[in-house]
Amino acid sequence: MRRETLLGLIFVVAACAYLLARLAPDVSGKPLHADEAVTGLVAARPFGEMLTTVLVERGGPPLHFVAAHVALVLDPSADALRWTSVAFALGTVILCYDLGRRIAGPTAGAAAALVVATSTILGQLGTLGRMYAAFAFFAALAADTFYRALEQRTARTAVVAAVAAVLVAATHPFGLFIVVAEAVAGLALWRGRPLRPALPVFAVGLLLVPVLYASLRLSDRFGVGAGESSPLSSPRAALREIHDAVAAFSGGHAVLLIFALLFCAGIFLVARQQPAFLALLAAAVAPPLVYLVVSGSGTVARSTRHLVYALPLWAALIGAGLVLLAGRFPLAVQALLLALVGVLGAGYQTKYAGDPRGVATLNAATSNPAALAGPAAWLREHVTPDDVLFQYATPYLAALDETQHATTIGPGPGGLLARGLDRVEFPASAVAVALQVAGSDVQSDELRARLEDDAEVELTRRWLVIRQPGPFANEDELLLAAADVVGAAHASTLSTPPRVEARIRGSFFVVCHALRQRSIENAECSSTFPED
């Protein structure tokens, strides 16, 4: 083995070890998030139901749910969901090494691996039980296979690159930008050649049909990253957020200039070797940046994590730039420079707003391990497989070993609740509702008076969990019971912080709205929401 290759592998192992040591404490230590509850509760269901829920009911690319399903079959727990993301994060480091190695040799690969392993964004999203670590992984795979296809120019490498591009799109809607970029670059390079060798690539493209359908289904509910915001963000605000996202790729603001210079040097090197790869970079990154500008300033901060797929490109070009500037130095000097890259990345971390599990949030206060221990234990004792759980709440995820057997339905835009009810097998034995009540004064006597006599209640400082036994013969009876439960909780909760009040009231409104669409009257709904 060449000394340079051995040196690169040593740094890759060190990068993976560093990232693993960084992520492992957060698997059980960080608060759970409602988005993770969606992933876990959907992915834990039988495979056919899970796929139908993702593609038809909710909409959105299914690949991360499939990966999570496999993990949860082995271990139905929130930790297993997060370890899936950790595995994708570590895989991203390895793939970025291979991408950098293809571009400019083992030293470039080692630098790319170090940049990724020390990045703030992967250090935070690498344990989030959502698709972001998988998105970075499959983006790295797509970039790696695309560069290989550019080098070898064979039908086989083109098919492999096409499959990898489809996998990115099957992980996140922004992956379609990579598909389009590779397709345009591939058609430009293939022009004038026989069509027959390219037919397998077009066949692979047919796999995009269900992915496109799922992405369109998602857009029926809301756009990626959508939220309350102005219709157009100022370019300065958007660029500031983009700057913060790129800083999160690099460890932090303090080292951003150094890595940016290396990145520019890497662009210069790749422009001489494989200019089509830079076309991929431009076509894949420019459209999302335009989206961030037009999507509204309130949306941008939450949307920057959707750019994690650009991290492998950023890291690989930094590695290429390092080789361009220092590739002729002795191997010992290159080793010192690689160590410096790792130290700069690890030593200068930036604050990153893209992780929804922030330590100073309502979510952190209500969904940390201590706050969830009581509700989760209670749910394990009371929930049965024939129960229906209303909305995707973190206590359900914390008790996934038992709640996975129940059916969870969630409120949301675009008729999401009605579609979720289609999955319920009637008669349902009970409906359970988990509500955040942190900082509220819950009047226990008032609550009991408003509930049915057989209702079961678990009240802690952070959570109110109510299970109303049935049986409920149909959707109407189930919705009426849910409205009574949430309405009783809403009416019995005093001195509620605004954000907690908004969530309880929002849950109540969704059920009441569903009842009114069915022309069903409910006294609690009528008194709280006289008009829709």
Image: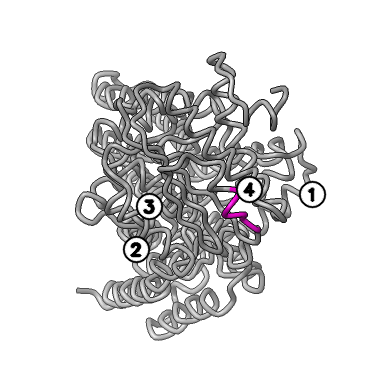
Name the residue rendered at 37%, 23% in the picture. 422
Image coordinates of residue 183 in percent, x first then y, are 42, 30
Q: Residues within 10 Å of mark 3 (few under 14, many from 20)?
A: many
The numbered mark, 1 or 3, whose residue comes first in the sequence reads 3
Q: Position of residue 387 (x, y in %)?
A: 33, 38
Secondary element type, mark 3? helix
Disc 3 residue type?
Phe
List the residue tagged with mark 3.
137
x and y, in percent, of residue 94 in the image: 32, 62
Question: For this view, does 168 lie left or right of residue 357?
Answer: left
Q: Is residue 444 magenta?
A: yes
What number is the disc on residue 236?
Answer: 1
Q: Earlier in the sequence, mark 4 or mark 1?
A: 1
**Quick one: label 3 or label 4, which is nearer the N terminus?**
3
Do the residues under discs 3 and 4 have CB atoms within 8 angstroms?
Answer: no
The CA span between labels 3 and 4 is 47 Å
Instruction: From the image, state whether disc 4 or disc 1 is nearer to you.
Output: 4
Q: Quadrant of residue 23?
A: bottom left
Task: State how far apart marks 2 and 3 are (Cα).
Answer: 8 Å
Dot 2 alpha-carbon crowd within 10 angstroms: few under 14, some 14 to 19, many 20 or more: many
For discs 4 and 2, the disc positioned in front in the rendered view? 4
Alpha carbon distance from label 1 to label 3: 30 Å
Q: Earlier in the sequence, mark 4 or mark 2?
A: 2
* Residue 88 shows in this picture: no
Q: Which mark is residue 90?
A: 2
> What amino acid is labelled 4 in the image?
Ser
Q: Position of residue 221 (x, y in %)?
A: 55, 28
The part of the chain drawn in magenta is 441-446
Q: Nearer the viewer, residue 291 or 215?
A: 215
Left or right: 85 in relation to 440: left
* For marks 2 and 3 on the same chain, the one whose residue lies earlier in the sequence: 2
